[in-house]
Image (spheres, rainbow, N blue to C red):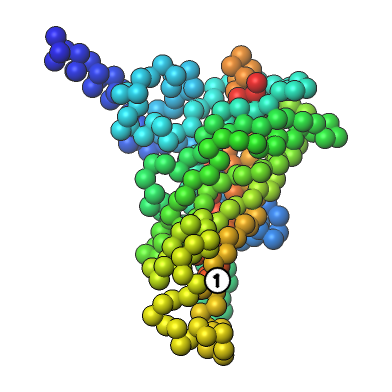
Amino acid sequence: MKLAVAALCATSAAAFAPSQVPAARSTELKMSLKEDLGKAAVAAAFGLAVAAGPAQAITKSELNQLSYLQVKGTGLANRCPEVVGEDTITPKSGQKLTEMCIEPKAWAVEEEIGKGGKTEKKFVNSKVMTRQTYTLDGIEGPISSDGGKLVFTEKEGIDYAPCTIQLPGGERVPFLFTVKDLVAKGSGPAFKPGFQMGGDFNTPSYRTGLFLDPKGRGGTTGYDMAVALPGLQSGEEGDEELFKENNKTFDVTQGRIEMEVNKVNAEESEIGGVFVATQLGDTDMGSKVPKKILTKGIFYARVD
Protein backbone atom coordinates (compact mmCIF):
# COMPACT_ATOMS: atom_id res chain seq x y z
CA MET A 1 0.00 0.00 0.00
CA LYS A 2 2.82 2.41 0.92
CA LEU A 3 4.55 1.72 -2.39
CA ALA A 4 1.34 2.48 -4.32
CA VAL A 5 0.86 5.81 -2.52
CA ALA A 6 4.50 6.79 -3.12
CA ALA A 7 4.20 5.98 -6.81
CA LEU A 8 0.99 8.03 -7.07
CA CYS A 9 2.66 11.08 -5.44
CA ALA A 10 5.66 10.82 -7.76
CA THR A 11 3.39 10.63 -10.79
CA SER A 12 1.38 13.69 -9.66
CA ALA A 13 4.52 15.75 -9.08
CA ALA A 14 5.95 14.82 -12.46
CA ALA A 15 2.73 15.83 -14.18
CA PHE A 16 3.13 19.42 -13.07
CA ALA A 17 6.90 19.74 -13.57
CA PRO A 18 7.97 22.50 -15.99
CA SER A 19 8.40 21.20 -19.49
CA GLN A 20 11.87 21.23 -21.02
CA VAL A 21 10.38 21.73 -24.50
CA PRO A 22 11.16 25.21 -25.88
CA ALA A 23 8.29 27.67 -25.62
CA ALA A 24 5.86 27.46 -28.52
CA ARG A 25 4.85 31.06 -28.26
CA SER A 26 6.46 34.35 -27.39
CA THR A 27 5.10 37.68 -26.28
CA GLU A 28 6.31 41.03 -27.51
CA LEU A 29 7.37 43.57 -24.93
CA LYS A 30 6.63 47.13 -25.92
CA MET A 31 8.90 49.42 -23.97
CA SER A 32 8.22 53.01 -23.18
CA LEU A 33 11.13 53.94 -20.95
CA LYS A 34 12.33 57.44 -20.28
CA GLU A 35 15.44 58.65 -22.09
CA ASP A 36 17.43 58.80 -18.87
CA LEU A 37 16.92 55.06 -18.51
CA GLY A 38 18.36 54.38 -21.95
CA LYS A 39 15.27 53.84 -24.09
CA ALA A 40 17.08 53.91 -27.42
CA ALA A 41 19.91 51.69 -26.23
CA VAL A 42 17.49 49.21 -24.71
CA ALA A 43 15.41 48.84 -27.87
CA ALA A 44 18.41 48.49 -30.15
CA ALA A 45 20.59 46.24 -28.05
CA PHE A 46 18.23 43.88 -26.30
CA GLY A 47 15.31 43.36 -28.68
CA LEU A 48 11.62 43.39 -27.92
CA ALA A 49 10.67 39.70 -27.64
CA VAL A 50 10.75 37.49 -24.58
CA ALA A 51 9.58 33.93 -24.11
CA ALA A 52 6.25 33.75 -22.34
CA GLY A 53 7.31 30.73 -20.29
CA PRO A 54 7.26 26.95 -20.42
CA ALA A 55 4.90 25.36 -22.93
CA GLN A 56 2.86 23.85 -20.09
CA ALA A 57 1.25 27.04 -18.78
CA ILE A 58 -0.45 26.74 -15.40
CA THR A 59 -3.26 28.90 -14.06
CA LYS A 60 -3.80 30.16 -10.51
CA SER A 61 -6.65 27.74 -9.89
CA GLU A 62 -4.47 24.81 -10.98
CA LEU A 63 -1.65 25.95 -8.70
CA ASN A 64 -4.03 26.17 -5.74
CA GLN A 65 -4.95 22.52 -6.18
CA LEU A 66 -1.38 21.31 -5.72
CA SER A 67 0.00 20.13 -2.40
CA TYR A 68 3.38 21.12 -0.96
CA LEU A 69 4.95 17.84 -2.06
CA GLN A 70 3.68 18.29 -5.62
CA VAL A 71 5.30 21.74 -5.84
CA LYS A 72 8.53 20.95 -3.99
CA GLY A 73 11.53 20.64 -6.30
CA THR A 74 9.60 21.39 -9.50
CA GLY A 75 10.30 25.13 -9.81
CA LEU A 76 6.60 25.99 -9.78
CA ALA A 77 7.01 28.13 -6.66
CA ASN A 78 9.15 30.52 -8.73
CA ARG A 79 6.64 30.83 -11.56
CA CYS A 80 3.81 33.29 -12.03
CA PRO A 81 0.39 31.91 -13.01
CA GLU A 82 -0.89 32.39 -16.55
CA VAL A 83 -4.21 34.07 -17.33
CA VAL A 84 -6.70 32.82 -19.92
CA GLY A 85 -9.14 35.24 -21.54
CA GLU A 86 -9.36 38.64 -23.20
CA ASP A 87 -12.08 40.31 -21.16
CA THR A 88 -12.30 43.77 -19.59
CA ILE A 89 -12.25 44.67 -15.89
CA THR A 90 -13.21 48.16 -14.75
CA PRO A 91 -12.08 48.57 -11.11
CA LYS A 92 -14.51 50.19 -8.69
CA SER A 93 -13.69 52.67 -5.96
CA GLY A 94 -11.82 51.03 -3.07
CA GLN A 95 -10.57 48.03 -5.02
CA LYS A 96 -6.90 47.03 -5.16
CA LEU A 97 -4.47 44.75 -6.94
CA THR A 98 -3.53 41.71 -4.87
CA GLU A 99 -1.39 38.58 -5.24
CA MET A 100 0.73 40.38 -7.85
CA CYS A 101 3.53 38.19 -9.12
CA ILE A 102 6.46 39.48 -11.19
CA GLU A 103 8.67 36.84 -12.81
CA PRO A 104 11.83 37.82 -14.74
CA LYS A 105 12.57 35.84 -17.88
CA ALA A 106 15.61 37.64 -19.34
CA TRP A 107 18.37 39.94 -18.08
CA ALA A 108 20.89 42.31 -19.65
CA VAL A 109 23.62 44.61 -18.33
CA GLU A 110 24.68 47.89 -19.92
CA GLU A 111 28.34 47.76 -20.96
CA GLU A 112 30.70 49.96 -22.96
CA ILE A 113 31.64 48.13 -26.14
CA GLY A 114 34.51 49.30 -28.29
CA LYS A 115 34.53 48.94 -32.06
CA GLY A 116 36.58 50.73 -34.68
CA GLY A 117 38.23 52.96 -32.13
CA LYS A 118 34.87 54.08 -30.76
CA THR A 119 32.98 53.02 -27.65
CA GLU A 120 29.25 52.90 -27.18
CA LYS A 121 26.94 51.66 -24.46
CA LYS A 122 24.91 48.55 -25.22
CA PHE A 123 22.92 46.07 -23.19
CA VAL A 124 24.62 42.67 -23.13
CA ASN A 125 22.56 39.53 -22.58
CA SER A 126 23.36 37.88 -19.25
CA LYS A 127 22.35 34.73 -17.43
CA VAL A 128 20.99 34.50 -13.92
CA MET A 129 23.16 32.76 -11.33
CA THR A 130 20.63 32.91 -8.50
CA ARG A 131 18.61 29.80 -7.79
CA GLN A 132 14.86 29.90 -8.37
CA THR A 133 14.11 32.51 -5.70
CA TYR A 134 14.10 35.68 -7.80
CA THR A 135 10.35 36.06 -8.46
CA LEU A 136 8.42 38.73 -6.55
CA ASP A 137 5.07 37.61 -5.13
CA GLY A 138 2.20 38.64 -2.88
CA ILE A 139 2.50 42.30 -3.88
CA GLU A 140 -0.58 44.43 -3.34
CA GLY A 141 -1.75 48.01 -3.22
CA PRO A 142 -4.75 50.26 -3.86
CA ILE A 143 -6.08 51.29 -7.27
CA SER A 144 -7.04 54.91 -7.69
CA SER A 145 -8.06 57.13 -10.59
CA ASP A 146 -6.25 60.20 -11.87
CA GLY A 147 -7.85 62.06 -14.76
CA GLY A 148 -9.85 58.99 -15.74
CA LYS A 149 -6.77 56.75 -15.79
CA LEU A 150 -5.92 53.98 -13.32
CA VAL A 151 -3.05 54.40 -10.86
CA PHE A 152 -1.58 51.47 -8.89
CA THR A 153 0.41 52.22 -5.72
CA GLU A 154 2.52 49.38 -4.31
CA LYS A 155 2.23 49.01 -0.53
CA GLU A 156 3.40 45.59 0.64
CA GLY A 157 4.36 42.04 -0.26
CA ILE A 158 7.53 40.13 -1.13
CA ASP A 159 8.68 43.09 -3.19
CA TYR A 160 12.43 42.50 -3.36
CA ALA A 161 14.76 39.64 -4.20
CA PRO A 162 18.60 39.65 -4.15
CA CYS A 163 19.85 38.39 -7.52
CA THR A 164 23.15 37.87 -9.31
CA ILE A 165 23.63 37.72 -13.06
CA GLN A 166 26.74 36.87 -15.06
CA LEU A 167 28.09 38.58 -18.16
CA PRO A 168 29.51 36.54 -21.06
CA GLY A 169 33.05 37.33 -19.86
CA GLY A 170 32.39 35.84 -16.44
CA GLU A 171 31.87 39.05 -14.45
CA ARG A 172 29.05 38.74 -11.96
CA VAL A 173 26.74 41.64 -11.17
CA PRO A 174 24.64 41.55 -7.97
CA PHE A 175 21.49 43.64 -7.71
CA LEU A 176 18.28 43.87 -5.71
CA PHE A 177 15.34 43.10 -8.00
CA THR A 178 12.46 45.11 -6.58
CA VAL A 179 9.43 47.34 -7.19
CA LYS A 180 9.36 49.06 -3.77
CA ASP A 181 7.13 52.16 -3.55
CA LEU A 182 6.04 51.73 -7.17
CA VAL A 183 3.47 54.22 -8.45
CA ALA A 184 2.31 52.94 -11.85
CA LYS A 185 0.08 55.18 -13.96
CA GLY A 186 -2.16 53.49 -16.50
CA SER A 187 -3.24 54.35 -20.03
CA GLY A 188 -6.99 54.07 -19.45
CA PRO A 189 -9.86 53.46 -17.01
CA ALA A 190 -10.05 49.66 -17.36
CA PHE A 191 -7.83 46.58 -17.54
CA LYS A 192 -8.04 45.05 -21.00
CA PRO A 193 -5.61 43.62 -23.58
CA GLY A 194 -3.31 46.45 -24.63
CA PHE A 195 -3.65 48.39 -21.36
CA GLN A 196 -0.29 49.81 -20.28
CA MET A 197 0.94 51.16 -16.97
CA GLY A 198 4.33 52.18 -15.69
CA GLY A 199 6.15 54.26 -13.14
CA ASP A 200 9.20 54.73 -10.95
CA PHE A 201 10.19 52.69 -7.91
CA ASN A 202 12.93 52.82 -5.27
CA THR A 203 15.82 50.36 -5.22
CA PRO A 204 17.35 49.97 -1.74
CA SER A 205 20.99 49.03 -1.21
CA TYR A 206 21.89 45.43 -2.04
CA ARG A 207 23.57 45.16 1.40
CA THR A 208 22.33 46.49 4.76
CA GLY A 209 24.26 48.51 7.31
CA LEU A 210 25.07 45.39 9.35
CA PHE A 211 27.10 43.84 6.53
CA LEU A 212 30.86 43.67 7.19
CA ASP A 213 33.38 43.60 4.35
CA PRO A 214 36.52 41.40 4.47
CA LYS A 215 38.32 44.12 6.46
CA GLY A 216 35.57 44.22 9.08
CA ARG A 217 34.17 47.57 7.97
CA GLY A 218 30.43 48.23 7.91
CA GLY A 219 27.79 50.92 7.72
CA THR A 220 26.46 50.82 11.28
CA THR A 221 28.94 48.45 12.91
CA GLY A 222 32.50 47.18 12.48
CA TYR A 223 35.78 49.05 12.08
CA ASP A 224 36.05 52.59 10.74
CA MET A 225 39.09 51.71 8.65
CA ALA A 226 41.17 48.76 7.48
CA VAL A 227 43.17 47.77 10.56
CA ALA A 228 46.14 46.58 8.48
CA LEU A 229 46.61 49.96 6.77
CA PRO A 230 46.54 52.64 9.52
CA GLY A 231 49.23 54.78 7.88
CA LEU A 232 47.07 55.36 4.79
CA GLN A 233 43.98 56.33 6.79
CA SER A 234 45.22 59.03 9.13
CA GLY A 235 43.02 61.77 7.70
CA GLU A 236 45.94 63.24 5.79
CA GLU A 237 46.63 63.16 2.04
CA GLY A 238 46.75 59.38 1.75
CA ASP A 239 43.20 58.95 3.02
CA GLU A 240 41.44 59.89 -0.23
CA GLU A 241 42.32 56.63 -1.97
CA LEU A 242 40.44 54.55 0.62
CA PHE A 243 37.72 57.04 1.54
CA LYS A 244 34.89 55.26 -0.30
CA GLU A 245 36.01 51.87 0.97
CA ASN A 246 36.02 53.07 4.58
CA ASN A 247 32.86 55.18 4.53
CA LYS A 248 30.01 52.77 3.81
CA THR A 249 26.71 54.20 2.58
CA PHE A 250 23.18 52.84 2.16
CA ASP A 251 22.36 53.97 -1.37
CA VAL A 252 18.74 54.15 -2.54
CA THR A 253 18.48 54.57 -6.31
CA GLN A 254 15.52 54.82 -8.66
CA GLY A 255 14.30 52.37 -11.26
CA ARG A 256 11.42 52.23 -13.69
CA ILE A 257 9.03 49.53 -14.87
CA GLU A 258 6.61 49.38 -17.79
CA MET A 259 3.82 46.80 -17.92
CA GLU A 260 1.38 45.79 -20.63
CA VAL A 261 -1.71 43.67 -20.01
CA ASN A 262 -2.39 41.02 -22.67
CA LYS A 263 -4.76 38.62 -20.84
CA VAL A 264 -7.79 39.39 -18.67
CA ASN A 265 -10.15 36.91 -17.00
CA ALA A 266 -13.17 38.84 -15.68
CA GLU A 267 -14.74 35.77 -14.04
CA GLU A 268 -11.66 35.18 -11.87
CA SER A 269 -10.76 38.93 -11.66
CA GLU A 270 -7.29 38.16 -13.01
CA ILE A 271 -4.95 40.12 -15.26
CA GLY A 272 -1.65 39.07 -16.79
CA GLY A 273 0.92 40.45 -19.15
CA VAL A 274 4.54 41.34 -19.75
CA PHE A 275 6.92 43.88 -18.25
CA VAL A 276 10.28 45.49 -18.80
CA ALA A 277 12.20 47.17 -15.97
CA THR A 278 15.48 48.98 -15.65
CA GLN A 279 17.39 49.75 -12.46
CA LEU A 280 20.89 50.16 -11.05
CA GLY A 281 22.90 47.32 -9.56
CA ASP A 282 24.95 47.03 -6.39
CA THR A 283 27.28 49.91 -5.41
CA ASP A 284 29.16 47.80 -2.83
CA MET A 285 27.93 50.29 -0.21
CA GLY A 286 29.15 53.33 -2.09
CA SER A 287 32.58 52.17 -3.26
CA LYS A 288 31.70 51.18 -6.85
CA VAL A 289 29.85 52.71 -9.77
CA PRO A 290 26.62 50.70 -10.26
CA LYS A 291 25.79 49.06 -13.57
CA LYS A 292 22.44 49.57 -15.29
CA ILE A 293 20.39 46.37 -15.49
CA LEU A 294 17.47 45.54 -17.78
CA THR A 295 14.93 42.88 -16.77
CA LYS A 296 12.08 41.42 -18.82
CA GLY A 297 9.38 38.93 -17.95
CA ILE A 298 5.74 38.34 -17.11
CA PHE A 299 3.38 39.44 -14.35
CA TYR A 300 0.09 38.37 -12.80
CA ALA A 301 -2.38 40.09 -10.45
CA ARG A 302 -5.93 39.91 -9.11
CA VAL A 303 -8.40 42.79 -8.84
CA ASP A 304 -10.14 42.60 -5.44
Tally the marks: 1
Task: Residue at 53%, 48% (x, y): give it.
Answer: 177
Quarter of the rendering occupied by the N terminus: top left
Left or right: residue 112 compared with residue 146? left
Q: Position of residue 295 (x, y in %)?
A: 53, 49
Q: Position of residue 233 (x, y in %)?
A: 50, 83
Task: Residue at 63%, 57% (x, y): give it.
Answer: 253
Q: Position of residue 239 (x, y in %)?
A: 54, 84
Residue 104, compared with residue 291, is above or below; it is above
Residue 44 falls in which quadrant of the image?
bottom right
Residue 244, compared with residue 171, is above or below; it is below
Q: Is residue 155 visible?
A: yes
Left or right: residue 240 compared with residue 94? left
Residue 207, compared with residue 227, is above or below; it is above
Residue type at mark 1 is Asn
Q: Which residue is mark 1?
A: 247
Quarter of the rendering occupied by the C terminus: top right
Task: Residue at 51%, 55% (x, y): give it.
Answer: 208
Residue 200, compared with residue 217, is above or below; it is above
Residue 240 falls in which quadrant of the image?
bottom right
Q: Position of residue 79 (x, y in %)?
A: 44, 34
Taking the view exactly as shown, the residue that stands out farthest to the top is 1
Task: Residue at 74%, 26% (x, y): give it.
Answer: 190
> In this view of the protein, which residue sits in the foreground, 23 or 207?
207
Left or right: residue 268 compared with residue 207? right
Taking the view exactly as shown, the residue that stands out farthest to the right is 147
> In this view of the protein, which residue sits in the foreground, 38 or 185?
185
- Label 1 packing within 10 angstroms: few (<14), some (14-19), many (20+): some
Q: Is residue 49 visible?
A: no
> Callout 1: helix, strand or loop?
loop
